[in-house]
Image: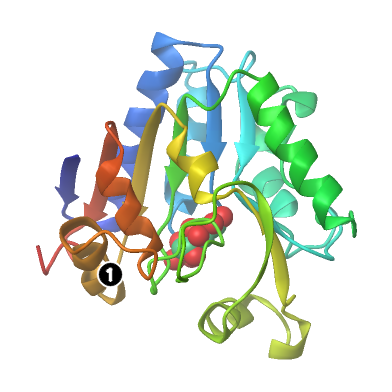
Amino acid sequence: MQLFIEETYEDMSRRAADLIAAQLIVDPASTLGLATGSTPIGLYADLVEDFQADRISFEQVTTFNLDEYRGLSPEHDQSYRYFMQKNLFDHVDIDPEATSVPDGANPDAQAACESYEQAISEAGGIDLQLLGLGHNGHIGFNEPCDEFPVRTHVVELTESTINANSRLFESIDQVPREAYTMGIGTIMKARAILVVASGVDKAQIVRDAFFGPVTPQVPASVLQLHPNVTVVVDAEAGSLL
Ligand code: F6R
């Protein structure tokens, strides 16, 4: 594992964006795995800036997002598809057809998850997977549990995740209770993984995930077994290391 502890959120974002930009420069036809949430917003803005300054292009890039709420249409302003359009896709030269987010509007969980897993395989797998880190160690929507889930699947969200996400909805009742998410196996198959974490409230989980025991009770801890992981944190999130 490679670890960068950067001073501020802005520095963390710039470092992570540089690593993604380097991937696109080395292989302009990369397949990226992408995350939503608060943490990557700054790095997406940096990538948009890099695109506008002609340093990188997304023309040949393919993307797969980690997860999506089940029951939200792509147009819903809290859907992860909407987030990706707003923060990245609408501002770069990516082919819309080459961007995938699990189909939250498909009520058939098995079909939605199977076809997603298959599309990733058909694209040749993910070159670089970006991940944020939940307070309970979740990655994607893989919550603490007794066994690492392998493939893309439907999950019931925990109260802690529903509470954390309720800030983005008008009321907690509007937060969807289920989501489609890549499995831990799907994530671990990526050839390289980039994890970002920011803020003092992530300090304990950063320590537990990357320096504690590997256990499905801390889903991100499995990343210790991946041969190519880079973790980029700001000073607050790295304050217990
Ligand atoms: C988002 C995702 C989640 C977040 C995690 C951290 O697609 O899969 O696992 O990465 O909840 O979220 P933030 O960055 O908002 O703290």
- Residue 240 drawn at (x, y percent): 11, 69
The residue beneath circle 1 is 205
Which residue sits at x=74%, y=22%?
A: 95
Please state which of residues 41 and 134 is positioned toward the viewer in this rendering.
134
Q: Answer left or right for 205 relative to 144.
A: left
Does 213 appear above or below 127? below
What's the residue at 46%, 37% (across, down)? 129
Query: In terms of secondary structure, where does tag 1 sit?
Result: helix
x and y, in percent, of residue 80 in the image:
69, 55
Question: Residue 107: percent from the left, percent from the top?
Answer: 90, 60
Closer to the camera in the image, 137 or 188: 188
Taking depth in this image into account, of 220 and 145 the one nearest to the observer is 145
| Vertical order, 228 against 114 (above or below) | above
List x then y, in percent, for residue 224.
25, 47
> In this rendering, does residue 16 appear at all?
yes
Report the residue at 26% width, 59% height from top: 214
Q: Could you classify mark 1 by the number of other residues whose Cα lies within 10 Å: few (under 14), some (14-19), or many (20 or more)?
A: many
Vertical placement of residue 206 versus 44, above or below = below
Q: For residue 93, say whether it is visible.
A: no
| Viewport quadrant of the C terminus | bottom left
